[in-house]
Amino acid sequence: MGNEFELEVNHLKFTVNFLKAYNASLNQQQNKTSADILETRKMLNDDVSNTFDFEDGNVMDFISMLPEMRMTESNYNHIEKMLDVTSRMIKKPYFGRLTADGEPVYIGNATIQDNNQDILIYDWRSPVASLFYENRIGELSYTIPDGSKIKTDVSLRRQFQIENSEMQKMFDSDLYIGDEMLQQLITDSSRAKLKNIVATIQSEQNIIIRQPLSQNTLVYGPPGSGKTSLAMQRIAYLMFTYRKQLKADNILLMSPNEVFNDYVSDVLPELGEDNVKNMTFYRMQKEMPYFNGRQFESLADNIQRLNSEDGSAYRYKTSKGYFEDLKQYMDTLGEDGMYFRDLKYGTKTFIAKEMIEKVFYNNLSQHPVPRRLHKIYEYLLDMYQRELKWLTNRKYKELDKTREYIGEKEELQKMANDYATKALARVHQQIKRFRFVQLEKIYVRSITDKAVRSETIENVKRNNFMYEDLAPLMYLYIHILDVSDKKMRHVIVDEIQDYSNIQYAVMTDYYGKATFTSLGDKNQQIHPVGSEALDVQDHHMMTLRKSYRSTNQINDYLNTIVPGGIESVSVDGQEVQFINAADEAGYIREMIADNLPEQMAVITPSREAADEMYEQLKDDIPGLKNLQEVDTIYNQDYLVLPYYLSKGFEYNTVIITESEFYDDLPLIKYVLASRATRNLYLID
Ligand SMILES: Nc1ncnc2c1ncn2[C@@H]1O[C@H](COP(=O)(O)OP(=O)(O)OP(=O)(O)O)[C@@H](O)[C@H]1O
């Protein structure tokens, strides 16, 4: 092994030197390309834009230069990306090695070729690198893009710990148990944000990451089994494997809240990829103009409200039974049950709902519902143009007659036009937003439970929509108008257990051209009412069992809440602390006085309790942050937060205050306790 270590140290030196030289040549290329771009731009400025005239041949010159300019700029972007990648890789060129069919295969964050085009380092996402994540040696096989399997004899699997271009340690490991690299990562809690796990992806995780793009996948796994990490690694994998089809803006990450996006935002850039578009279920309605101006309760407010209120309306509206009723109601809209709105301006009716209804049910009855509505939309826009013209003319005549304004005819015309445009602005907006359809009434009619229906009518009247109204309204909107986002090719949904069947249908139907990877844990529903299990079709179901986050002691405690929930792959730490303290803030103050943990989250049962706790602790904990529902930045090591915001995160030390609050909510306690990596305190 001594000799082997030396050989590896030499190979590392060679690779680092190569990367340094490569990086320097990229630097030179970048300078040259940026000089070329500047020169072209300057030339265009001088020669073209001063005399930008279609009569002049220089416009043609400009057009003929465009492809080359685009190529130079894309070349520049590529060089910049490679500069970034190689700068990182100089410090840590690779993390693993295989000997496959007698040949060394080094594995790192990107593929690097030497001057003879031989591969010096394989990207971790390349097919052959998959063998590394099998965590064993022997006769193995990997799949290449055409689907065929390549049999390979793997005689060595080696992991490296390299820091600042220096070899620290190496391990030859063919067994996952005793994986020292993994153990070291598990004990490293130096970072507040989610880290990449590229060097220690486990075989059950590797299978999930490498599912084909065409496959819908549903993954369940206990707390700490790496679901969020996999979500990010999978995005990086898809972007590499399908780079011709997929750009960052074709992939969507559906997050439980806004701050979560920041929590995961380091992973993709570290892996050399751009961050993808992110979304929350709540924010989806903002992409649908119909809902502009409608006030929807936020998820956080919904959770707080239903903590103390009766949840029967929520239960009804998220149930499979209601979803079936809604679909049935929608199926008959072509014959009956469609509701419209009068469009008015001033005291005048632009169009009466009865008229729209007549066109919808009589004149257009041969078409499907969405087609009818789009045709009505066109008629109404046409009508609007005619009305605008008529109103402008009338105003023009009026102005002309009063002769109060003596000016140019064009000015008079403009005044008349401005007047008419303003008068009809609301009508125009309503047409554009399809507000001539009375979606809310259709929704209310689809509710068969009398009490829920009358409560909903009151809320609609007050423009006070509940969170649970979002999904059925969006579902109606998407289907009645046949609206979808055609750009997304893949959607990753984390914390899938927090979505009802109707919510999932909204996502899969709206992102209709995308396949889905959804990840969650049925035992981690944070909503006080909860939803029924997800009924999905055409999804490959996968289960994770092992958990990498918390110490064995914390995992043992978690297993007392959900027996057998977690298979612990971890290290020992201190026992879970159950504390009785009349003055909770006082206890925390004392506890941290001589030993402030690296990171700490104080979790409270409500927003009010969080505000109060923050006031009591802020002078004792430097940089303490009171995390808000609307926050989008996650970079604090010391946090106070209400429990429903803790979803998906992890902290070195977790203090659950007023823990008796969760006595009847054991699964919420489970979620909160599983946020701790090293130390867990439950105070009551
Ligand atoms: N293969 C791995 N190698 C190293 N660390 C890992 C691995 N898998 C997961 N982890 C670590 O375990 C912790 C939990 O991972 P993650 O947050 O992705 O789990 P999760 O399943 O989403 O958890 P939860 O359901 O509780 O939100 C993270 O610190 C992550 O870095």
Image (spheres, grey):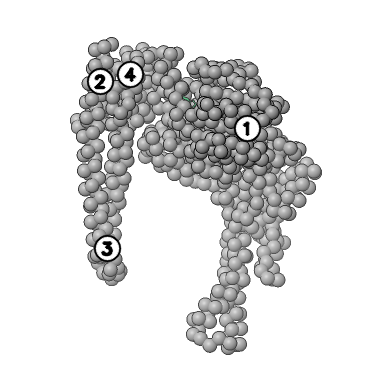
Point 56% across, 32% down: residue: 601
Q: Earlier in the sequence, mark 2 or mark 4?
A: 2
Q: Earlier in the sequence, mark 1 or mark 4?
A: 4
Taking the image as drawn, is residue 154 in sight?
no
Compute the Cα span from label 2 to label 1.
Answer: 52 Å
Which residue matches tag 3?
45
Point 59% across, 84% down: residue: 399
Q: Position of residue 522 (x, y in %)?
A: 61, 27
Is 368 placed left or right of 459 in the picture? left
Which residue matches tag 4?
169
Q: Position of residue 235 (x, y in %)?
A: 44, 35
Compute the Cα span from label 4 to label 3.
Answer: 56 Å
Tag 4: amino acid: Lys
Is 678 placed left or right of 70 in the picture? right
Foreground: 448 or 189?
189
Indicate which label's residue lies in the foreground, 2 or 3: 2
Indicate which label's residue lies in the foreground, 2 or 1: 1
Compute the Cα span from label 2 to label 3.
Answer: 53 Å
Which residue matches tag 2?
9
Report if the CB atoms under discs 2 and 1 are less than 8 Å apart. no
Q: Earlier in the sequence, mark 4 or mark 3?
A: 3
Q: Secondary structure at mark 2?
A: helix
